[in-house]
Amino acid sequence: MKKQIGLVLSFLLLTISQYSYAQNNAAKALLNKVSQKYNGYKTIQAGFTLDIRQANGSSHSDAGTLYLDKANNKYHVNTKNQILISDSRTQWNIMKAEKEVEISEASNSTNEINPTNIFTFYTSGFNYALANTEKAKGMSLSVVELKPIDSKKNYSKIKLRINKANNLIYDTTIFDKSGNRYTYSLNSQEGNKAIASSFFTFNKSNYTGFDIVDLR
């Protein structure tokens, strides 16, 4: 009897393992299509909304536009209260209400999610699983759940929803280990739009009266 139970358990474990492997492969194949789509763009302009739900029940939202020069790791992010500019070497954090600019070295690390890899961060470092298809605003969305291989990451899971019609990201939800949830929704996306190189540099004359704090 014990031998039979052992055989059944072994079969179940093998079945689960095969299913997980198939799910991982299917999810990764989908994400490869998505990354290929974005890798075809030299520049991207995207309007986004950020919704933050904190563990204590409070919530906050913000909106803005991201301009990305993918080939050169440059970006410009403009929201109501803040502007982030990077020329790939230096980052300028412009806080509008405080009238202050913080200067720091740009981080181009692939080990963290940042504006330079926001469209392709999922290509490595995760275990993947396909979830049930979801609907939003009349669109059919593929759902991929990503869990970081590195357990030291400050988030436990990322949920990526992808528009089935065009393989573009619809939204990304990050679940951090403190119970907070961050959802980035892409309201508009335009690839290969001409963006002047000056847009990715800081022009001091545009911020007269701002305090400049160099943290480098």
Image (cartoon, rainbow, N blue to C red):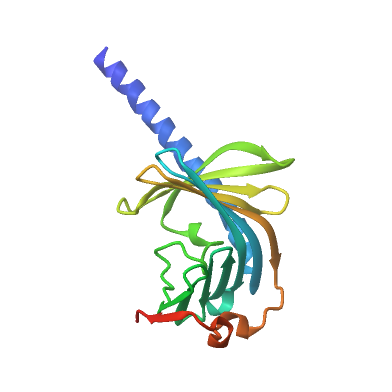
The image shows residue 137 at horizontal and vertical percentages of 72, 42
The image shows residue 131 at horizontal and vertical percentages of 55, 38
Q: If the image is split into quadrants, where does the C terminus sit? A: bottom left
Q: Considering depth in this image, is 76 or 159 the residue closer to the camera?
A: 76
Q: Is residue 101 above or below residue 55?
A: below
The image shows residue 105 at horizontal and vertical percentages of 39, 79
Residue at the extreme left of the image, as rendered? 2
Q: In this view, does 161 lie above or below 193?
A: above
Residue at the extreme front of the image, as rendered? 209
Q: Considering depth in this image, is 209 or 62 the residue closer to the camera?
A: 209
Q: In this view, does 137 lie above or below 1?
A: below
Residue at the extreme top of the image, as rendered? 1
| Quadrant of residue 68 within the rendered picture | bottom right
| Quadrant of residue 194 within the rendered picture | bottom right
Q: Which residue appears at 57% of the width and 73% of the height?
A: 76
| Quadrant of residue 188 within the rendered picture | bottom right
Q: Is residue 51 visible?
A: no
Q: Considering depth in this image, is 127 or 115 the residue closer to the camera?
A: 115
For the image, the number of numbered tags is: 0
Q: In this view, does 13 lie to the left or right of 183?
A: left
Q: In this view, does 27 lie to the left or right of 150?
A: right
Q: Is residue 145 left or right of residue 162?
A: left
Q: If the image is split into quadrants, where does the N terminus sit? A: top left
Q: Which residue appears at 44% of the width and 38% of the height?
A: 57
Q: In this view, does 194 lie to the left or right of 177?
A: right
Q: Which residue appears at 74% of the width and 40% of the height?
A: 138
The image shows residue 136 at horizontal and vertical percentages of 68, 40
Q: Which residue appears at 50% of the width and 41% of the height?
A: 22
Q: Can residue 18 be seen in this view?
A: yes
